[in-house]
Image (cartoon, grey):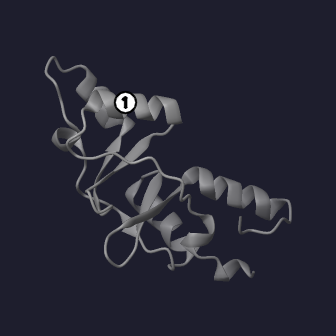
Amino acid sequence: MKRRDLRIADVMTTALTTIHASDPVLGAHAEMQVGVIRHLPVVDDRGRLVGVLSDRDVLRALGSKRSVRVVDIMSRDLVTARPDAPAHFAAALMLEYSISSVLVVDEAGTLVGVVTMTDYVELARRSLLGLPLER
């Protein structure tokens, strides 16, 4: 595959941990610790993306004395891309918005993956070693 032909689908992660808006933040925090992840996509019952919860959101909420739900602190301003977009597009979004991941959705808004800075570091490693770029 030529480097210019790489699509987001070629570099994104599809094994995702997700949560629902009604979930308690303490449960989301536990999921993040177990999975060693910094962002949890928030989906509705149909798998459509409705928000994202970052580790920073969780840390701020943990200081609260009240019970907090994901919906209370999740970000609704989402940066997304389609799986068929060029791989460089998600990298450009990360640089433009100073974020470390881009959520990948299909035409219906259903979450299908996530591409992270770690995915791009792996892509760079493979390129530097002359390995095939797609996983």
Q: Residues within 10 Å of mark 1 (few under 14, many from 20)?
A: many
Q: Amino acid type of disc 1?
A: His
Q: Residue at x 32, y 44 (%)?
A: 53
Q: Residue furthest left?
A: 66
Name the one closer to the observer, 80 or 24.
24
Picture quadrant of residue 78: bottom left
Name the one closer to the observer, 47 or 105.
47
Picture quadrant of residue 25: top left
- Helix, strand or loop at label 1? It is helix
Residue 27, given in percent of the width and then of the height, sits at 33, 30
Q: Say whether residue 48 is left or right of residue 93.
A: left
Q: How many marks?
A: 1
State the residue position of label 1.
29
Q: Say whether residue 119 is left or right of residue 104.
A: right
Q: Residue at x 74, y 68 (%)?
A: 133
Residue 1, given in percent of the width and then of the height, sits at 75, 80
